[in-house]
Image (cartoon, rainbow, N blue to C red):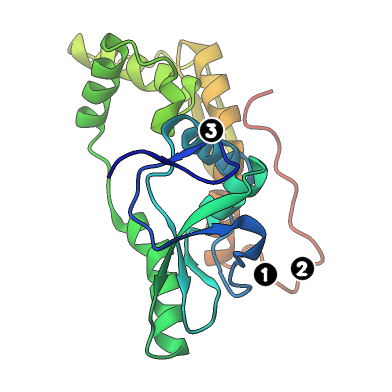
C-alpha cells in the first residue's frame, strides 16, 4: 500500500484500514485487562513516529470499543495525533469480542525468542547503520548487554566473573564483570523484575490480598 498521510497529521499510514478516525472518537474497552506501562507507550510512540502506522486500531462494530490496539491508541494520544487508522470488525456477540481481545493480549506471550537469531539480526542492523537501534523495541542498554553475552559466547566461554550477588525474597541476582552495563540493563527493566517477583510471591502464597500492603523491594542495583 502506498504511503498516505492522515488529515492534519504528520505520521504516514502504510497499513490497510477501513477509515481514518479522529483520535478522540476512538474509545478503548474499559474491560481490557492489559495494562500498558508508560515506558512501553513511550517506546511504541517513538516507533510509530519513525516508522509510520504499520498496524491499525481494531474497533468492534458491535460495541464501538477498541478490541486490538489499545497501546497504539495510547501512543497516538501521547503524540497528540488528531487521527488514527481504524479497522472495523464484526463480532457475533459480546463473548466473541472479549475472547478476541484477551487472545490478542495473550497469544504474543506464548512465543519464545531465539536469542542467537536475535543477536545476529541486531549485529546486521548495526552494520546497516540503523540510526536508532531502539526502533527494534529494545533499549540501548539491553542491546549492549545482549551483545556482550554474544561476544563471550563467540570466544567459546562464558565467564561472568561475578561482581556481586544479592538475595531478594529468595531470588539471587548476579551481576557480571561489565557492571555498569548490567546496572543499566536491570534499571531499565526494573518494573518487569518487580512485577515478576511479586507475581511469584503471590503464586506461592507469600503475599495475599489480606495483607495490608506488599513488602517494599530494595533496588537490585544501588
Residue lying at 29% horizontally and 18% vertically, measured from the top left: 125
Label 1–label 2 contact, CB within 8 A = yes
Seen from the viewer's position, the closer of residues 199 and 65 is 65
Instruction: Identify the image quadrant of the C terminus.
Output: top right
Tell me if label 1 and label 3 are in contact, CB under 8 Å: no
Residue 74 versus residue 119 in the image, above or below: below
- SS type, badge 1: loop
Q: CA distance from mark 1 to mark 2?
A: 6 Å
Q: Nearer the viewer, residue 85 or 28?
A: 85
Task: Tell me residue 192's x, y (percent).
Answer: 55, 44
- How far is the residue under mark 1 from the one under mark 3? 38 Å
Q: What residue do we see at 48% from left, 84% from top? A: 62
Q: Place residue 68 in its image quadrant.
A: bottom left
Position of residue 148 measured from the top left corner of the image (x, y, whole percent): 36, 14
Q: Which mark is residue 211?
A: 2
Which tag, 2 or 3, sits closer to the chain's start?
Answer: 3
Q: Is residue 7 above or below residue 116?
A: below
Question: Nearest the camera: 183 or 97?
Answer: 97
Residue found at x 43% / y 34%: 137
**Gap between marks 2 and 3 measured at Cα:** 39 Å
Where residue 218 sits, quadrant-wise, is top right
Q: Are marks 2 and 3 in contact (CB under 8 Å)?
A: no
Front residue (pair 17, 157): 17
**What residue is shown at x 35% (from left), y 43% (from top)?**
14
Which secondary structure, mark 3? Answer: helix
Which quarter of the figure is the N terminus placed in? top left
Residue under label 3: 46
Residue under label 1: 208
Q: Looking at the image, is 68 positioned above or below residue 5?
A: below
Q: Is residue 52 left or right of residue 120?
A: right
Amino acid at each position: 500500500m502506498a504511503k498516505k498521510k492522515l488529515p492534519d497529521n504528520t505520521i504516514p499510514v502504510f497499513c490497510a484500514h477501513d477509515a481514518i478516525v479522529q483520535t478522540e472518537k476512538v474509545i478503548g474497552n474499559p474491560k481490557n485487562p492489559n495494562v500498558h506501562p508508560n515506558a512501553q507507550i513511550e517506546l511504541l510512540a517513538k516507533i510509530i513516529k519513525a516508522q509510520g502506522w504499520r498496524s491499525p486500531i481494531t474497533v468492534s462494530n458491535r460495541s464501538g470499543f477498541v478490541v486490538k490496539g489499545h497501546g497504539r491508541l495510547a501512543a497516538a494520544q501521547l503524540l497528540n495525533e488528531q487521527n488514527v487508522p481504524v479497522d472495523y470488525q464484526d463480532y457475533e456477540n459480546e463473548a466473541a469480542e472479549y475472547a478476541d481481545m484477551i487472545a490478542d493480549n495473550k497469544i504474543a506471550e506464548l512465543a519464545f525468542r531465539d536469542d542467537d537469531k536475535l543477536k545476529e539480526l541486531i549485529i546486521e542492523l548495526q552494520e546497516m547503520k540503523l540510526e536508532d537501534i531502539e526502533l527494534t523495541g529494545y533499549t540501548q542498554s539491553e542491546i549492549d548487554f545482549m551483545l556482550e553475552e554474544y561476544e563471550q559466547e563467540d570466544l567459546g566461554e562464558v565467564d561472568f566473573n561475578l561482581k556481586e550477588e544479592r538475595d531478594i525474597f529468595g531470588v539471587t541476582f548476579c551481576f557480571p564483570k561489565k557492571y555498569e552495563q548490567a546496572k543499566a540493563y536491570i534499571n531499565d527493566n526494573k518494573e518487569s523484575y518487580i512485577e515478576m517477583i511479586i507475581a511469584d510471591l503471590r503464586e506461592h502464597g507469600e503475599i495475599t490480598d489480606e495483607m495490608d500492603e506488599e513488602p517494599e523491594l530494595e533496588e537490585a542495583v544501588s
